[in-house]
Image: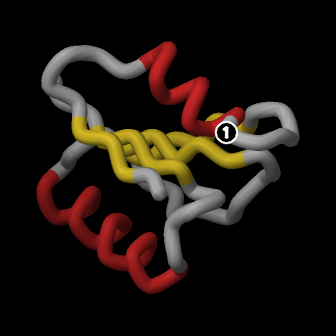
Amino acid sequence: MTKIWIDADATPRKIKAILFRAAQKRNIPMIFVANCWLELPRLKVIQLKVVAQGFDKADDYIAENCEDGDLIITS
């Protein structure tokens, strides 16, 4: 199944809110990747992956773990 990967450090709050609603409405798995803990809605389709601090750590994690057909949202 296609997943949506989000660099949560680079995504504005308003865009995250839109993504939360889309995940709930469409039942699309989303993985938010950030270098610190974030409070996210408790939905089965939303996950948080916390990575180490540092430039492009979230992008690097996404690049290493995404699959063909996944959608990636980053700066």
Q: Inspect this view and state whether residue 38 appears.
A: yes
Answer with left or right where residue 64 lies relative to residue 28. Answer: right
Answer with left or right where residue 75 lies relative to residue 28. Answer: right
Q: Residue at x 14, y 25 (%)?
A: 69
The residue most toward the right is 53
Front residue of 9/48: it is 9
Position in image of residue 17 (x %, y %): 41, 78
The residue most toward the bottom is 14
Q: Residue at x 44, y 71 (%)?
A: 16
Answer with left or right where residue 56 lies relative to residue 28. Answer: right
Give the secondary structure at mark 1.
Answer: loop
Q: Residue at x 77, y 46 (%)?
A: 35
Q: Inspect this view and state whether residue 44 appears.
A: no
Position in image of residue 60 (x %, y %): 59, 26
The N terminus - image quarter:
top left
Report the number of numbered marks. Answer: 1
Q: Residue at x 46, y 40 (%)?
A: 31
> Is the residue 12 above or below the residue 3 in the image?
below
> Is the residue 42 above or below the residue 14 in the image?
above
Q: Which residue is mark 1?
A: 56
| Residue neighbourhood size for the residue with mark 1, other residues' Cα within 10 Å, grouped as few (<14), some (14–19), many (≥20) | few
The amino acid type of the residue labelled 1 equals: Asp
> Is the residue 18 above or below the residue 46 in the image?
below
Answer with left or right where residue 39 lies relative to residue 19. Answer: right
Front residue of 68/21: it is 68
Q: Quadrant of residue 9?
A: bottom right
Position in image of residue 40 (x %, y %): 58, 62
Q: Quadrant of residue 24?
A: bottom left
